[in-house]
Image (cartoon, grey):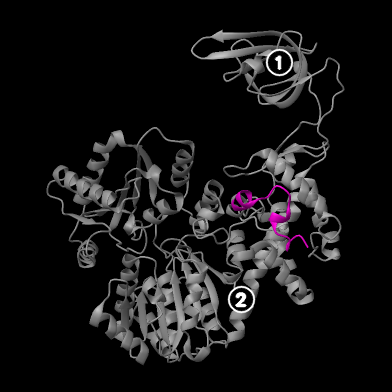
Amino acid sequence: MLADTPVTALKGVGPKNAERLHKLGIHSVQDLLFHLPIRYQDRTRIVPIGSLRPGDQAVIQGEVELADVRFGRRRSLLVRLADGTGSITLRFFHFSTAQKANMLRGSWLRCFGEVRNGPQSYELVHPEVQRVAEGQAAEVEQALTPIYPTTEGMHQLSWRELTGRALDLLGAGGLQELLPDQVLREQAMPPLAEAVRLLHRPPPDQSQRLLSENGHPAQRRLAFEELLAHQLSLRVLRQRQRRRGAPPLRGDGRLQQALLDALPFRLTGAQQRVLQQLRDDLARPHPALRLVQGDVGSGKTVVAALAALCCVEAGYQVALMAPTELLAEQHLRNFANWMGPLGVELGWLSGRHKGKRREATLAGLGSGALQVVVGTHALFQHDVLFDRLGLVIVDEQHRFGVHQRLALREKGAAGQAPHQLVMTATPIPRTLAMTAYADLDLSVIDELPPGRTPVSTVVVNDKRRDEVVERVAGACREGRQAYWVCTLIEESEVLQCQAAEDTAAALAEALEGLRIGLVHGRLKASEKEAAMTAFKAGGIDLLVATTVIEVGVDVPNASLMVIENAERLGLSQLHQLRGRVGRGAQQSHCVLMYHPPLGGVAQERLAVMRETTDGFEIARRDLEIRGPGEVLGTRQTGEMQFRIADLLRDQDLVPGVQALADRLLASHPESVAPLIHRWIGSKVQYAGV
């Protein structure tokens, strides 16, 4: 089997080439066969020169009419080639005497290159050139020429030679067919070996357009199988989770009802629906695994708090984990306000906690005295032990890796897994969520609380900064509050904080009489807390901040948000920041200030922000602009990285993939592990298989 044949078994793969291939994740001959071309060149026919158009890549053949060295800004060799249908200029900036001698007038040449517009005529710049005899028979390639994604030291000729040798080994049974024959017939898919062979050496009659758009049936066949493997890996993970068992959490409703009675608002229909789903989950004897999506301001936190109280009522502990200290502190404040009066004991754990304070928290968790703990990544640490952990709540799941989320399952009581509730305010298009989070049930809070008015958004050139400052002054003098968010393209937190400090000082000078606060990542927690508390209480008119306020801050009186250099932020981050306003009943505004010139992607992002406040529509457009790896936050972690499939392009395959995953698990379980191993390989541990 080629899956077990090391790539070093191929002639031409010595230690150096093996190292280069390993960098690309190619260890076996099967891996090499799944390293597909990114595009193709048509060298299967000689094209008449007279039919060429700019942008064409073509093989031509003709007689040299003129060869001349020109001296201008750059010395170049110009060769005019004609074939009776037309002529074209070959231009060389780098050439030797021997090359020039091969292109004397009357010589016949066969060339391959891309046609461009030149000063006097069409040109090929530095084409591949071969000298031929006059009237020589047109020996051309028998298949489209593949162009492979490559790495330093690996040339296209090497790729073609290596894949040619791998295809020679393909033969019968070289690649195990893991999809049942019936499925291939139903889906009208070619067999795997046939699809792979075609994609490496497509016959001339195959559509280059389909191949370039990755819409060819052979490409779709491989994308389908890869998506299926990822779906199966998450399903198997879920099955294993459920086999472990979890404590059924059936509270008496006393604490939940007390909180509902104390709230100054009624839950929306969507909140009530999702809360009931969570209660049903928690009552079962296997671990709940649920993703709750909700747009900014939809009220996910209060639903999570009620689920937490259900767990506390049943005599178990709750851990809530957030990606940043600021967000974790916000959750702690909310939970303390809601649960403190009910007598629930809360703890707080972050990486900054040391010494006796940390020891006291750990002791409270170990003894069960602390019923709810809120924290950051610090909750993952080995010495954090619980007495009876029943529920883990993870906020902003896309900031954590799947393996990090799963690390908390090991902290359950007496070998049982805790229930898991995952929340995100970054809406993920449903198809993408169903693929990326196949181990989770999906709930959506798709209703905003009554009285919310959509935020009005404008995009302005930073040359109009003075007008924006005046607008801030007007809003604050009318008794409203405003945010001014500073962004820097530099990754340095020091520079970002310095920019915020400088902006705060400049605005204090321009807005004499207004109370201006400052929040950034390098302030002490107590200083951030003091600034946010003062802002929320109305003691600060204008809060200058870095993007640390992206999530979790809730100040209903804040009705104006100014984002400097908005072109430097992604759609998701802009939407999250804008969500800090519009939380009260009055009309709110967001000013996106940009520094020209704007690139195409930045223009598109800012236009989307101006057009809509719907988080799911923004997420859909974000997916189109950035791609799924960025939207899910998995590009850096290596999770959900596909070799062939593309979640955006191939999303129409997902329903069929999900249906087949169910069938294979039920009727063809012997195919599941090999499929997962083939496509996920070394990442198999992450998938829990």
Identity of the residue drawn at 44% across and 43% down: 606
Q: Judge whether 677 appears above or below 126 on screen.
A: below
- Is residue 278 shown in magenta? no
- Secondary structure of the residue carrying numbered label 1: loop
Q: Which residue is mark 2?
A: 238
Residue 344 appears in view: no
- Estimate the spatial distance between the alpha carbons at disc 1 and disc 2, rounded to whole Å: 67 Å
Taking 552 as reference, is 540 left or right?
left
Mark 1 or 2, closer to the camera: 1
Which of marks 2 and 1 precedes in the sequence? 1
The magenta stretch spans which residues?
1-19
Identity of the residue drawn at 84% across and 27% down: 139
Which quarter shows the C terminus? Answer: bottom right
Closest to the observer: 192 or 173? 173
- Secondary structure of the residue carrying numbered label 2: helix
Residue 105 at x, y percent in the picture: 72, 8
- Is residue 15 shown in magenta? yes
Closest to the observer: 202 or 240? 202
